[in-house]
Image: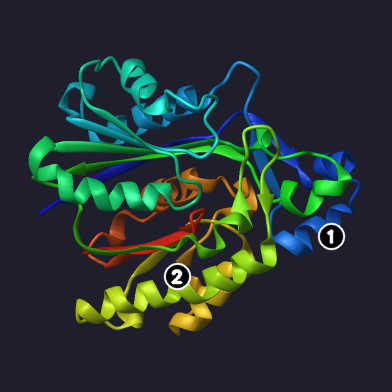
Amino acid sequence: MAFLRGFGCYLPARVVDNAELALMVGADPAWLLHATGIEQRRFAADGETVSSLGTAAARDCLKNCGAAAGEVGLVIAASGSGEYRFPGPATAIARGLGIQGVPAIDLPMASAGALFGLSLAAGLAHQYGNVLVVGSEIMSRVVRLEPSWRDTAVLFGDGAGACLVSATAGFAEIRDSVLASDGEFAEALRLYLDAPLYMDGRTIILHASRKMPRAILQLLERNGLQPGEVGTYILHQANLNLITRVAQAVGVPEAKFFRNLARYGNTSSASMLIAAAEWRAGSQEKLAQPLVFAAFGAGLSWGAVLAV
């Protein structure tokens, strides 16, 4: 048994709206909004790193939970945009929290990493007590902000989110999860060491709009729930079109899907936890309602998590 104790997030101070980005990529600001549903995104400052963003989100999470860093027994950090091949940001985040010696695991997974981390945390909480899951990304440094790459560059922003999973108490129990991966189309979303992020958008949205709803429906069916009984769906904030497609495929109103994409863009593995932190901050009265988390990303990897 494992529980969600709370969430936190950190967003860099610099706001990049469509008017500013349009100058970089040679596009019309109105087109950017129409094509993506994004109004603005955050870009990290020169001195900020994936681990520093993650540490700030982790601190916010612990504060919101009323927990001390010393209570954390395991750190799981998801990121596809870390500055190094290794080490990943997990140990640096633990150090930033002052908990050296606590095991820290990296999940180098873009977009779906936080979801996989949440599922792993639920399974490991009985052994480690409190598991801190962090998703942190600086996507502005792995895309090319120029006209020839604009279809990809305009989607992404920077930020970090965090979640504390506990073996003993929380506002919702993590009941079940469905995870899946398939490397057949892995080349459709990739980041080489010496090249900017590449995404075949058509292939990705085709697979995501099919596989994510299937995972959600599979999860709900084996737990005896109908899609309409879920209080809130919190998805990886990839793009507005995908969220709309998932809502239609599952057969529930879009209003049940929490969205903050317009303010932050696609922050990859940070996005789901940033969304969860904002949902939690504004939805204290809805704690009894079931939650479904879902994501799709590089690998290709996807899945869903149920909390009740």
Residue at 83% over, 39% down: 20
Left or right of 228, for residue 299: right
Report the quarter where the C terminus lies: bottom left
- Read off the residue under disc 1: 31
Picture layout, residue 292 above or below residue 16: below
Residue 167 seen anywhere in this rendered image of the structure: no
Residue 95 seen anywhere in this rendered image of the structure: yes
Picture layout, residue 120 above or below residue 20: below
Report the quarter where the N terminus lies: bottom left
- Read off the residue under disc 2: 212
Q: Position of residue 149 (x, y in %)?
A: 80, 47
The amino acid type of the residue labelled 2 equals Met
Q: Position of residue 40 (x, y in %)?
A: 70, 46
Q: Quadrant of residue 230?
A: bottom left
Left or right of 160, for residue 74: left
Picture layout, residue 164 above or below residue 94: below
Q: Residues within 10 Å of mark 1 (few under 14, many from 20)?
A: few
Q: CA distance from mark 2 to mark 1?
A: 27 Å
The residue closer to the viewer here, 193 or 252, is 193
Dot 2 or dot 1: first in sequence order is: 1
Badge number at residue 155: none
Picture layout, residue 266 above or below residue 90: below
The residue closer to the viewer here, 29 or 192, is 192
Left or right of 305, for residue 147: right
The residue closer to the viewer here, 221 or 229, is 221
